Image: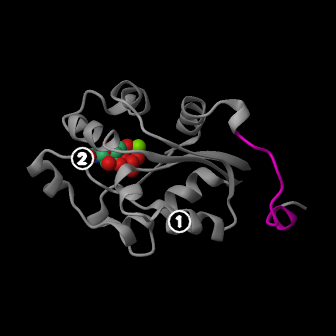
């Protein structure tokens, strides 16, 4: 039940200087940071990460957004971490994301607004959607040597 998931604070989140606040939310629930780095992705890498979206109408805006500055990429580990992190992140559209979620608390834009301008939906953060994506995304962004195995104080309470 202990899972690893991939998270990236997108360029809009980095540029708004809310990296610390966002990471703090993951630390507070007891998730372990297993890997962490800053990366400025190029278009080729963006196409790999967002392979499922490359042929969609919103992809050009999404690509421009994800390559407009560095992202803070991380691997988080914890009990059923993939679904837990998606819960903390909230729904894709900030307009619809409830207060208390990262997207609901730190962003407000809508699909309608983004589509009208032909830009990506700036929703601050990416998180793997399911176990298959988590595996693929962790392997795409991190080498085995960059992912660390260590104990946090939370492990005392997580283990039997
Ligand atoms: N996105 C967009 N316009 C859309 C749908 C998605 O700009 O109509 C962007 C948005 O930033 C989103 C990302 O593309 O986070 C990936 O979309 P997905 O549906 O996978 O949402 P997520 O998994 O990030 O919640
Ligand atoms: Mg997705």
Quadrant holding the C terminus: bottom right
Look at the numbered discs 1 and 2 and tell me whether their residues touch, using CB distance below 8 Å: no
Quadrant in the picture for residue 27: bottom right
Q: Is residue 109 left or right of residue 151?
A: left
Answer few, some or many: residues within 10 Å of disc 2's Cα (few below 14, many 20 plus, some between 14 and 19): some
Is 139 magenta? The answer is no
The residue at which mark 2 appears reads as 120
User: Does residue 10 appear left or right of residue 148 in this picture?
Assistant: left
Spot occupied by residue 103 in the image (x, y as percentages of width and height): 38, 64
Residue at 27% in and 41% down = 62
Taking depth in this image into account, of 134 and 149 the one nearest to the observer is 149
**Which range is magenta?**
147-157
**Element type at mark 2:** loop
Extreme residue in the top direction:
44
For residue 2, side relative to residue 21 (left or right): right
- Describe residue 22's horizontal placement relative to residue 138 as left or right: left
**x then y, percent, for residue 157:** 84, 68
Question: Magenta stretch mostly in which secondary structure?
Answer: loop
Please name the residue shown 59% across and 40% down the image: 131
x and y, in percent, of residue 156 in the image? 87, 65
Mark yes or no: residue 124 visible: no
Q: Is residue 54 in view from this perspective? A: yes
Is the CB–ligand 1 distance for label 2 below 8 Å? yes
In x, y percent, where is residue 92? 35, 55
Residue at the image point whose x is 18% and y is 46% from the top: 119
Residue 92: image tag: none
Residue 89 vertical placement versus 36 (above, below): below
Q: CA distance from mark 1 to mark 2?
A: 23 Å
Question: What secondary structure is marked by label 1?
Answer: helix
User: Is 81 rendered above or below residue 73?
Assistant: below
Label 1 sits on residue: 20
């Amino acid at each position: 039940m202990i899972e690893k998931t991939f998270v990236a604070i997108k360029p809009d989140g980095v540029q708004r200087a809310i990296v610390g606040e966002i990471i703090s939310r993951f630390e507070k629930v007891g998730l372990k940071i297993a890997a962490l780095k800053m990366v400025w992705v190029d278009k080729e890498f963006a196409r790999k990460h967002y392979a499922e979206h490359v042929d969609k109408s919103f992809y050009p805006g999404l690509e421009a957004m994800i390559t407009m500055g560095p992202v803070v990429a991380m691997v988080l580990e914890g009990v059923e971490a993939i679904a837990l992190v998606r819960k903390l992140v909230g729904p894709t559209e900030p307009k619809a994301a409830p207060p208390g979620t990262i997207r609901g608390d730190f962003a407000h834009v809508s699909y309608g607004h983004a589509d009208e301008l032909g830009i990506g939906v700036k929703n601050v953060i990416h998180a793997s959607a399911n176990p298959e994506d988590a595996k693929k995304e962790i392997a795409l962004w991190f080498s085995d040597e960059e992912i660390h195995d260590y104990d946090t104080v939370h492990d005392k309470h997580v283990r039997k």
